[in-house]
Amino acid sequence: MVIKNKTNLLGNNKYFDPKMGFGGGLFLAFVVFFINYDHGFANALIAALKQGLYTFIAGGTMMRIAENLSIRFKNLILSIFLAVLIPTILAVSFTFIVHSAKGTPEPLNSTIPTMILAPFGFLWWALRKRKQLNSIRD
């Protein structure tokens, strides 16, 4: 029986980052709750809960994708560019799809925080993880 290595070059799980997923989910749930509060507590809570759960799962996965891409290629600019672009496109697309489902009064407005914050978050994470890889290699 062959056991495949499920860690990346930094020793982290290749597929999911639970700590980043939880932090992002909690933060965006609060943001989305207040965006939708004008539509009533119940509607805002539904939107916030969906955002929180979605961000925990998708955000934890997207952060790991960003990490993996940031350390994948020797070319720093290519790695960082892809580590920001690909997870941002996925995160914005999936967020809009989730909020377009029944229950979110303002799906496009609920996606705006992801559009604005995701690229910066992925850039920060990619640079941090690339620096971590360089320190391991040195």
Image: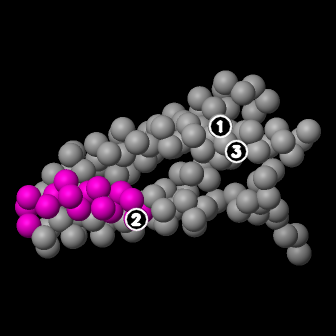
Q: Earlier in the sequence, mark 2 or mark 1?
A: 2
Residue type marked 2 = Leu
**Secondary structure at numbered mark 1:** helix
Q: Residue drawn 39% across and 59% down?
A: 27
Give the percent coordinates (x, y) of residue 36: 16, 58
Residue 26's disc is 2
Secondary structure state at the residue bearing disc 2: helix
Secondary structure mostly taken by the magenta-highlighted segment of the chain = helix
User: Would you identify the image quadrant in which residue 40 lies?
Assistant: bottom left
Q: Is residue 69 on the magenta stretch?
A: no
In the rendered structure, which segment of residues is drawn in magenta? Answer: 25-40
Left or right: 33 as drawn, with respect to 92:
left
**Disc 3 from disc 1: Cα separation:** 6 Å
Query: Could you tell me if residue 101 is visible in this image?
Result: no
Q: Which residue is mark 3?
A: 129
The quadrant of the rendering that contains the C terminus is top right
Of helix, strand and loop, which one carries label 3?
Answer: helix
Find residue 10 and report its horizontal and vertical position in percent. Answer: 78, 52
Viewport quadrant of the N terminus: bottom right
Q: Mark 1: which amino acid? A: Leu
Tags 2 and 1 in contact by the CB under 8 Å rule?
no
Distance of mark 2 from mark 3, alpha carbons?
Answer: 22 Å
Residue at 53 percent of width and 51 percent of height: 62
From this view, report whether residue 23 is shown above or below residue 82.
below
Mark seen at residue 127: 1
Picture layout, residue 128 above or below residue 77? below
For residue 110, say whether it is visible.
Answer: yes
Q: Residues within 10 Å of mark 2 (few under 14, many from 20)?
A: some
Q: What x and y, as percent, mark residue 61? A: 55, 57
Q: Picture coordinates of residue 97 (x, y %)?
A: 30, 52
| Mark 3 burial class by Cα count in 10 Å: few <14, some 14-19, many 20+ | many
